[in-house]
């Protein structure tokens, strides 16, 4: 059960010819896939295409009706390998994943696919997680397209262009027997817009037809001599075919007036370039530009003739190409030199070499370019604030009171207590080398925990500690891995590897029943009953299955003392060999989403319901905040002390508390302070509850009145 | 074309005449062949934290705009930012009519450009500050709607003392940076309406009159969304009114009110009035009240007895603001009311406390409430409240200590709302009358007397250093291990005093040591700072 639902939104996938579609980019992509007559689609979740996977999940009925097979792939490699269905058969298929990390994982399959080529259209939709909000290393998918010679689409970030890119991507793939990558940046995935829909297409040739009438062609297999043949074919046949298609179908676009300077840009940069031009007075809001634009909706391969034509009458061009290395700019230099053109090429010199091309960066670069070549185009009296010489950043009010606010564990997160426990163990046994992994648990590297030394990729937590395996010390290392990473590859790359190499270290598998960081999708070990997937496969069985002898399961991670004790045992036991702790508790975000409606129903039916929430007594709290340093829960924060004598703020639990119990467990395990209490709010109390309440109320009330009398006269 | 109807509609500035975009001039010269621009986008940035409903707010704006003759585009960067991190939702609106007239769709940007944002909505004060530092708020253009509530950052929360940033500087920056600044606690307003902050902020957006939509059009967007419509509309209305009123706001917390003293403390109060200088009154009133609340009225008199000599010394050696007396008065009161098991039990069993929990947990009249305490008494917590002789004997007698440790030494959950739980604590609280004879009382008062003695001694020779020493008990707080650590740090500072007295700038050095002690839990920074002064850190308390 994923975090976001698109049950309502997916109804728009039924829209027919000429009807207006309104919605998010990813939904439009799904619609475009259906309009293109795909037979199968697969992928692995991860921002920014997590929601695409969620949309597909919620659209499964619609997909089935059209005969489309949809898979949640085990990994991006699985997803990419799925495209093999298009090698021998005229089947259109698409896969999607996060890039560049997912493309890294997928590249074995992608390279094989690209070598032999495809018969049916094969589309790889990569969610480019680059720039603001990105959670991965800053690299480019462009390099993957170049190295395997797949074509790379980078459409203008509006729904009609994106939809068109999907449709043309399949055609391009088929025309050139080459898989095509469609690059979607994070904001394009989530952009809300509209386009005119077409009818969904049910493929004529179906999966069934392929299975029942198998075809093989040994020349498509990557094995000599085929592999040498493929390389020749790429250059001699597929490349020219692609260029021809792109040229003839005018996939790239030319805009703007005639002028002797121009801008060459990736399609994805278009909107922000137009905004920059508009601010500089060089375009109206509709994109009617005073400067000629050559928009590369296909960023690989480049079309030499189009570039030569665009540049031949220009003194200078500015290349707006996000990310580095500057592949396009370098390529352009080579193309122009071969053609003998003297057009001056700018790009990274006027924009920035590294980093996201925000609208601000682009506007500044455009200003620099135009100022250098056509200053008379600019109305210098009315420049935008951003490039006004008088408006230096110093002129803005400077405040020091803004602190970074990185994401962290949610309220009630079951992973937090694992790190609270580890912090307590470290107080006893000293610091450990901790190998982190990808997932929510990576938030441990941030305050207040500050635990974790590196992360080498999804599921590679234990693998990344492989070298630390020596008889010269008794001290062990600790590695983390999430359930998502475990099934993605960690079972073999980490656990199998540790068994085989006789590792004497500790792995913690954080099992919260979902791939939580990507939005709560189900996996093999999920506890949910998923109608279209097989779940409930225990991680412990898999771990034992590959030969781990020392395995402990914690079924309630909030029990900090118990987790601490298991850690201590794993770190100090005389037993040699790999040790695996499976720490299970359901992701709180998803648990809440699951439980809330049930509770609401119970309440409405008059059933007894107990809600728990924690609290801190502000008069016994002394404002040391040890509890926060061991928890970091968003619901456990500070407030001004109600005591006029105390300067330090006191701890407080705010209303978002879901009563997970960690506060109390930490207070106990770390022997903190008696200020924490758990309130139980009983709705629809039973007769016994009410009777007890009345008796207690009478006696406690009487005793409290005695205290009141003592305190009378002290205050007014 | 709903943007031009309705009596409450604000007028959107017409372009290009009123703005500095320069499109008209350009279109006459350089780009005359292009259709002239008649409008530009309205740009709205929403800064929120994951889970605060920034997306809901953006969706309402889009829905309203699309149903009122505007084209809308919204983007966001969700991903891991959803997990409580700061994030931006960005919306652009464009009049449909202008688009129709030109026969083209507008090209809208996917992210805000500094200096080109019409409305910034921040769900929290530091996020408003973030918008300002990012250049999104500019005096020529931006309406800044900021909720003044604080969601403290991790850095602020994990500080060992007070790590809060200066809210006032954020408000000042808002005033300086925005064309129109609308600060209000929209979070509390939402709570009062039993709704969410996105609704009050949407109301504030309506109330700000910045957008060309009528209030009705705003409200219809909420109604169309179909979720919690009634409470959202109520919160919307509250937000709109708050934004229309535009109350001036100050970031300064209200000055601590002088506590109101009851008749039992009249004698002590008049003594404060007569014998102590006015600048110290607020603190001393709070002090005597605390003493009486903690122990009895006689204890309040003792408190004043102890402070009288300090008052005299401050009069003689101070600078007239009575810093020494005030800080000594503050920390003496806190120290004399140290948190022993008796105090904790007393506070936890009071009626006012039960009522406070009830309110905090939002218990209504049809619900029942149970309160469970998380207690972890060590042996020390027991011996502390024993008669001094007995307590000291247990601590040095290993079999007695380990016997007691079996009783203690484990976390307990005590249900104060049950008879058994309440009576246990109530009995413990009643031990208050025997407190003066307890082990801990004697220990604390010995330490207090040592501290007061050094204050008195230092006040004469180095007044500033005395003031700093007066503030040192701030280090002693918490319970259990935390308290042990704090006491150890305090003792380290006290042992450094003889060295500090020999050096110039002793006060500043002591302050630096105190800050080092509060800078990390491991005590490393303090040890380093002490070592620089040539003093060995650590050692017994």
Image (cartoon, coloured by chain):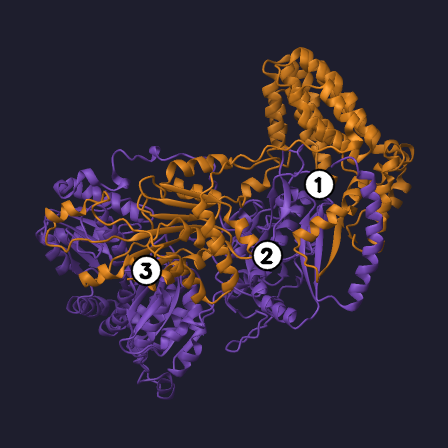
Question: Is residue B255 or residue B209 the one in the foreground?
Answer: B209
Q: Which residue is mark 3?
A: B72
The secondary element bearing badge 2 is classed as loop
The secondary element bearing badge 1 is classed as loop
Q: Looking at the image, which residue is at 63% across and 37% down?
A: B521
Question: Both on one chain, marks 3 and 1?
Answer: no
A397 w.r.t. B18: above or below: above
- C-alpha distance separating marks 3 and 2: 36 Å
Question: Is residue A554 or residue A558 the one in the foreground?
Answer: A558
Mark nearer the N terminus (1 vs 2): 2
Q: Which residue is mark 2?
A: A413
Q: In the rendered image, what is the letter of the chain coloured purple?
A: A
- B129 displayed left or right of B452: left
Q: Position of residue A463 (x, y in %)?
A: 52, 56
B169 w.r.t. A430: above or below: above
A5 w.r.t. A503: above or below: below
Q: Chain of mark 3?
A: B
10 Å neighbourhood of mark 1: few (<14), some, or many (≥20)?
A: some
Q: Position of residue B206 (x, y in %)?
A: 40, 53
Q: Which residue is mark 1?
A: A619
Q: Quadrant of the N terminus of chain B?
A: bottom left
State whether residue A629 appears in this view. yes
Which quadrant of the figure has residue A382? top left
Question: Both on one chain, marks 3 and 2?
Answer: no
Q: Looking at the image, which residue is at 50% across and 56% down?
A: B235
């Amino acid at each position: 059960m994923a975090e976001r639902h698109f049950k309502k939104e997916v109804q728009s996938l039924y829209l027919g010819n000429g009807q207006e579609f309104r919605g998010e980019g990813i939904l439009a992509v799904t619609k475009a896939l259906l309009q293109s007559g795909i037979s199968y689609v697969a992928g692995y979740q991860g921002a920014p295409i997590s929601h695409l996977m969620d949309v597909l999940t919620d659209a499964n009925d619609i997909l089935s009706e059209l005969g489309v097979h949809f898979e949640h792939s085990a990994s991006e490699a699985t997803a990419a390998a799925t495209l093999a269905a298009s090698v021998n058969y005229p089947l259109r298929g698409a896969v999607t994943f996060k890039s560049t990390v997912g493309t890294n994982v997928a590249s074995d399959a992608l390279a094989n696919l690209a070598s032999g080529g495809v018969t049916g259209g094969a589309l790889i939709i990569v969610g480019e997680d680059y720039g603001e909000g990105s959670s991965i290393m800053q690299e480019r998918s462009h390099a993957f397209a170049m190295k395997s010679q797949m074509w790379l689409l980078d459409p203008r970030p509006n729904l009609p262009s994106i939809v068109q890119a999907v449709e043309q991507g399949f055609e391009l793939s088929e025309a050139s027997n080459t898989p095509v990558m469609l690059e979607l940046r994070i904001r394009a995935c989530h952009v809300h817009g509209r386009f005119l829909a077409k009818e969904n297409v049910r493929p004529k040739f179906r999966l069934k037809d392929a299975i029942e009438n198998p075809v093989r062609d040994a020349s498509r297999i990557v094995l000599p001599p085929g592999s040498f043949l493929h390389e020749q074919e790429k250059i001699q046949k597929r490349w020219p075919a692609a260029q021809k298609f792109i040229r003839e179908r005018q996939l790239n676009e030319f805009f703007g007036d005639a002028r002797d300077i121009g801008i060459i840009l990736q399609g994805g940069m278009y909107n922000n370039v137009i905004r920059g031009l508009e601010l500089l007075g060089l375009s109206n809001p509709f994109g009617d530009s005073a400067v000629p634009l050559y928009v590369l909706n296909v960023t690989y391969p480049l079309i030499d003739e189009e570039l030569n034509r665009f540049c031949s009458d220009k003194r200078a061009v500015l290349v707006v190409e996000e990310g580095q290395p500057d592949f396009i700019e370098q390529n352009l230099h080579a193309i122009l030199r071969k053609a003998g053109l003297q057009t001056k090429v700018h790009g990274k010199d006027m924009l920035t070499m590294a980093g996201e091309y925000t609208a601000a960066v682009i506007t500044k670069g455009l200003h620099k370019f135009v100022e250098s070549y056509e200053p008379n185009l600019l109305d210098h009296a009315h420049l935008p604030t951003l490039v006004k010489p008088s408006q230096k950043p110093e002129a803005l009010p400077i405040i020091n009171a803004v602190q970074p606010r990185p994401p962290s564990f949610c309220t009630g997160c079951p992973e937090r207590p694992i790190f609270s426990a580890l912090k307590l163990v470290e107080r006893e046994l000293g610091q450990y080398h901790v190998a982190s992994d990808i997932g929510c648990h990576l938030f441990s590297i941030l305050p207040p925990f500050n635990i974790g030394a590196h992360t080498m990729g999804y599921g590679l937590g234990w693998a990344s500690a492989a070298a630390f395996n020596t008889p010269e010390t008794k001290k062990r290392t600790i590695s983390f891995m999430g359930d998502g990473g475990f099934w993605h590859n960690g079972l073999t790359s980490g656990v199998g590897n540790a068994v085989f190499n006789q590792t004497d270290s500790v792995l913690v598998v954080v099992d919260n029943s979902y791939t939580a960081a990507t939005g709560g999708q189900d996996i093999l070990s999920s506890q949910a009953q998923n109608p279209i997937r097989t779940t409930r496969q225990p991680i412990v069985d898999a771990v034992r299955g590959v030969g781990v002898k020392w395995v402990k399961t914690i079924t309630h991670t909030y029990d900090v003392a118990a987790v601490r004790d298991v850690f201590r045992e794993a770190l100090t036991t005389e037993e040699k060999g790999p040790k695996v702790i499976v720490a299970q508790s359901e992701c709180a975000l998803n648990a809440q989403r699951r439980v809330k409606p049930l509770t609401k129903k119970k309440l409405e039916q008059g059933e007894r319901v107990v809600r728990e929430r924690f609290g801190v007594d502000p008069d016994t709290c002394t404002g040391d905040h040890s509890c926060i340093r061991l928890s970091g829960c968003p619901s456990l924060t500070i407030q001004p002390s109600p005591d006029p004598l105390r300067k330090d703020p006191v701890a407080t639990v705010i209303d978002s508390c879901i009563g997970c119990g960690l506060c109390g467990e930490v207070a106990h395990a770390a022997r903190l302070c008696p200020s924490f209490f758990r309130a139980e709010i009983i709705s629809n109390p039973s007769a016994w509850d009410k009777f007890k309440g009345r008796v207690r109320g009478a006696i406690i009330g009487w005793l409290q009145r005695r205290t009141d009398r003592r305190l009378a006269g002290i205050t007014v | 074309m709903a943007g031009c109807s309705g009596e409450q509609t604000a007028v959107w500035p017409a372009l290009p005449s009123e703005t500095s975009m320069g499109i008209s001039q350009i279109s006459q010269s350089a780009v005359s062949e292009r259709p002239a621009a008649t409008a530009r986008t309205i740009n709205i940035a929403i800064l929120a934290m994951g889970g605060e409903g920034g997306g809901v707010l953006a969706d309402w704006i889009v829905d309203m705009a699309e149903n009122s003759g505007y084209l809308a585009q919204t983007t966001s960067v969700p991903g891991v930012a959803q997990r409580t991190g700061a994030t931006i939702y960005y919306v652009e609106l464009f009049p449909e009519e202008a688009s129709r007239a030109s026969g083209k769709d507008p090209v809208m940007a996917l992210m805000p450009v500094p200096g080109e944002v019409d409305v910034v909505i921040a769900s929290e004060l530091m996020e408003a500050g973030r918008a300002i530092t990012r250049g999104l708020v500019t005096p020529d253009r931006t309406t800044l709607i900021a909720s003044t509530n604080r969601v403290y950052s991790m850095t602020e929360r994990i500080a060992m003392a007070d790590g809060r940033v200066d809210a006032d500087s954020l408000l000042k920056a808002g005033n300086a940076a925005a064309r129109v600044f609308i600060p209000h606690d929209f979070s509390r307003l939402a709570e009062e309406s039993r709704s969410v902050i996105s609704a009050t902020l949407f109301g504030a957006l309506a109330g700000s009159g910045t957008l060309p939509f009528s209030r009705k059009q705003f409200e219809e967007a909420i109604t169309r969304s179909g979720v919690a419509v009634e409470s959202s509309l109520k919160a919307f209305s509250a937000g709109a009114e708050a934004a229309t009123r535009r109350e001036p706001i100050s970031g300064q917390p209200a000055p601590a009110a002088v506590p109101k003293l009851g008749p039992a403390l009249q004698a002590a109060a008049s003594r404060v009035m007569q014998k102590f200088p006015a600048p110290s009154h607020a603190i001393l009133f709070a002090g005597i009240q605390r003493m009486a609340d903690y122990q009895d009225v006689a204890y309040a008199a003792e408190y004043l007895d102890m402070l009288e000599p300090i008052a005299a010394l401050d009069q003689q050696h101070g600078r007239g603001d009575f810093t020494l007396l005030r800080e000594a008065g503050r920390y003496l009161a806190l120290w004399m009311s140290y948190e022993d098991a008796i105090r904790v039990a007393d506070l936890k069993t009071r009626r006012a406390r039960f009522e406070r929990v009830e309110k905090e947990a939002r218990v209504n009249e049809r619900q029942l409430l149970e309160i469970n305490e998380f207690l972890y008494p060590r042996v020390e917590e027991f011996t502390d409240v024993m008669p001094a002789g007995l307590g000291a004997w247990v601590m040095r007698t290993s079999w007695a200590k380990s016997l007691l440790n079996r009783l203690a030494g484990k976390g307990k959950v005590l249900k104060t709302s049950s008879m058994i739980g309440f009576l246990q604590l109530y009995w413990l609280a009643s031990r208050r009358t025997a407190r003066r004879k307890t082990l801990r009382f004697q220990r604390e008062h010995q330490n207090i007397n040592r501290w007061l003695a050094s204050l008195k001694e230092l006040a004469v020779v180095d007044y500033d250093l005395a003031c700093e020493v007066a503030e040192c008990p701030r280090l002693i707080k918490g319970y259990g291990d935390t308290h042990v650590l704090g006491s150890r740090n305090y003792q380290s500072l006290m042992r450094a005093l003889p060295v500090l007295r020999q050096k110039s700038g002793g006060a500043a050095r002591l302050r630096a040591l105190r800050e080092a002690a509060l800078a990390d839990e491991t005590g490393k920074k303090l040890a380093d700072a002490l070592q620089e002064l040539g003093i060995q850190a650590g050692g017994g308390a």
